[in-house]
Amino acid sequence: MYTSPTDYHAFITLLAICLDNDILYKKEQVIAWADEIVMRDEEPDDFFVDLCLMQQNSAKMIASRLHYYLHTTTNKCSVKPVLGVLHSFHLSHPEALEQVIKALYSLLFIPSLTDVPESDIRHVEGSYNLSKDSMIGTPDEVYLKTLEFLREYKDEVLLTPF
């Protein structure tokens, strides 16, 4: 059996932004997932082998490796399933507003994604910054605005291996 990173493009995107923003997934889960693939496949892809060898690295370093893949691949995937997962996370973790905003904003810089609602993300991120600086709005208003934006993606499903 051969598993390609392209089989998990949207999931790799999710892992990268989660590790960057310390939400949802931890580095140990990522390494265990890659290790499972390496042990199962007869000739595992170098991408998964590299991840397995990063056990001593920080979550940020592992995220950097994931981002490197996302920036060098010619494959494309829709951002919608990732936004669906962020919607679920945002609903269940209202205290993590800043991490969700940062995760959304980081999606703007992943060239292998399609259907990125850039203006909506920039609007939510700008509203957060203004409320954080006590200029316009409150964090509660930004939470609701972010929830309203992400609600459009609530039915998008990303099948994850763990």
Image (tube, grey):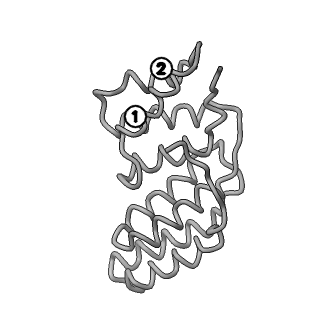
Question: Who is closer to the viewer here, 21 or 15?
Answer: 15
Q: Residue furthest top?
A: 43
Q: Residue at x 43, y 50 (%)?
A: 18
The residue indicated by pointer 1 is 62
Q: Position of residue 123 (x, y in %)?
A: 55, 72
| N-terminal label among 2 and 1 | 2
What element does badge 2 sit on?
Answer: helix
- Categorize mark 2 by other alpha carbons within 10 Å: few (<14), some (14-19), many (20+): some
The quadrant of the image that shows the N terminus is: top right
Is the residue 133 above or below the residue 86 in the image?
below
- Categorize mark 1 by other alpha carbons within 10 Å: few (<14), some (14-19), many (20+): many
> Could you say which disc has been placed on residue 149 in the image?
none
What element does badge 1 sit on?
Answer: helix
Is the residue 127 above or below the residue 107 in the image?
below
Question: Who is closer to the viewer here, 83 or 73?
Answer: 83
> Could you say which disc has been placed on residue 49 in the image?
2
